Amino acid sequence: MGTYNAIELSIEGDVARVNFNRPEKRNCMSPELHRNMYEALDEIEAAKVKVIVITGNGPSFCAGMDLEQCFLEPFDKPELMAEINHYAFGWFTRIKKSKAVTIGKVNGYCFGGGMALAGVLDIVVAADESLWGLSEVNFGIFPGGGTTWTVCNNMNRKKGIHYSVSGETFTGKQAEEFGYATFAVPLAELDAKTEEVIGKLTNKGRIVLGKTKEVYEKVLGMDFEEAIDYEMAKFWELSRETNDDWVRTALASFKRREFKPGTQAYTLVNDV
Ligand code: COA
């Protein structure tokens, strides 16, 4: 496993865990952190995990872009800025397209680019007490670099515009009400809740998890008839890639009344 200064990475079995590790800077994302994430994703992808969990060390999830190192310092060095953006937007795009299910464990501050990250992840478990905000307007810009896209795609228009133009903060509990977080629990229960969520994913097939996400994202932009065609094509693709696991093993087991698919996950034989 590579060594990284700005993050901690561990890969065990089906789960990769990333901790942003700049607590003294509230885990804001420096150029080094962006490069670390880009390289860590190579390792994570090679390990073919089912789940990636991202959180922050210390009292913060992520305080957004490092305003000094990503903006102030390289401002008059366009080539350097372009390189920083290459890694920053590169890993954001890759994590959004990841075949693994991505989980954000929002333990504390979640500002600006931190909200963009929470916004591209698939599942967010937030501490009730965590503090969120689109702070960009406070220093004279709008939420950019995909952040506005994540606002549009995770909360409704009235809330999205309000929090973008006011810079007002809100809590993890509110984030759940808005739909930006999947679950919100007291900070003391954050680890346990996240592990519960992970446990409900790792007992599923790796390929079916990836295809479920891919189909969801693509179908969002389709009309119903297109969606039927696309979903059926992907359905047979999944079936082929898993040697028809769903029918040959799972439904065969159901036929023997060995499990109830409504409430139990069958341990697949080929899609593991
Ligand atoms: N960029 C650069 N440095 C940052 C940072 C950021 N986004 N967020 C925090 N830091 C630095 C602080 O400048 C401070 O550095 P110092 O120790 O050298 O003075 C250190 O991290 C600790 O932050 P501090 O402000 O003392 O912590 P706090 O707990 O009192 O407040 C925040 C936490 C998140 C409310 C506050 O740090 C903040 O407003 N950060 C900016 C958040 C933001 O607007 N992000 C959007 C960027 S897109």
Image (spheres, grey):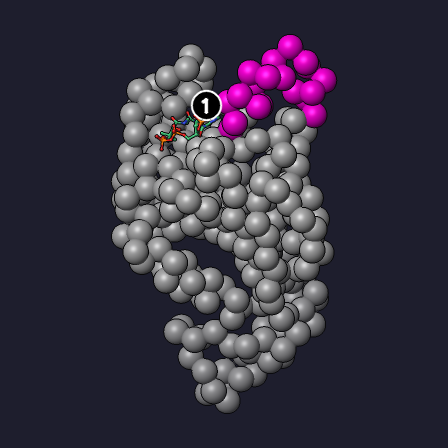
Magenta range is 65-83
Q: Nearer the viewer, residue 142 or 7?
A: 7
Q: Position of residue 9 (x, y in %)?
A: 59, 52
Residue 135's place in the image compared with 107, above or below, is above
Work out whether 47 lies above or below 112.
Answer: below
| Residue 221: x %, y % from top left | 53, 38
Residue that appears at 70% across and 65% down: 241
Judge whether residue 34 is colored magenta. no
* Residue 195 image-quadrant placement: bottom left
Most extreme residue toward the front is: 24
* Side of 207 where 185 appears, left or right: left
| Residue 200, horizontal then vertical, whole percent | 45, 66
Residue 8 seen: yes
Ligand number 1: quarter of image: top left
In the rendered image, residue 69 lying in the magenta stretch gets the answer yes
Name the chief secondary structure element in magenta.
helix
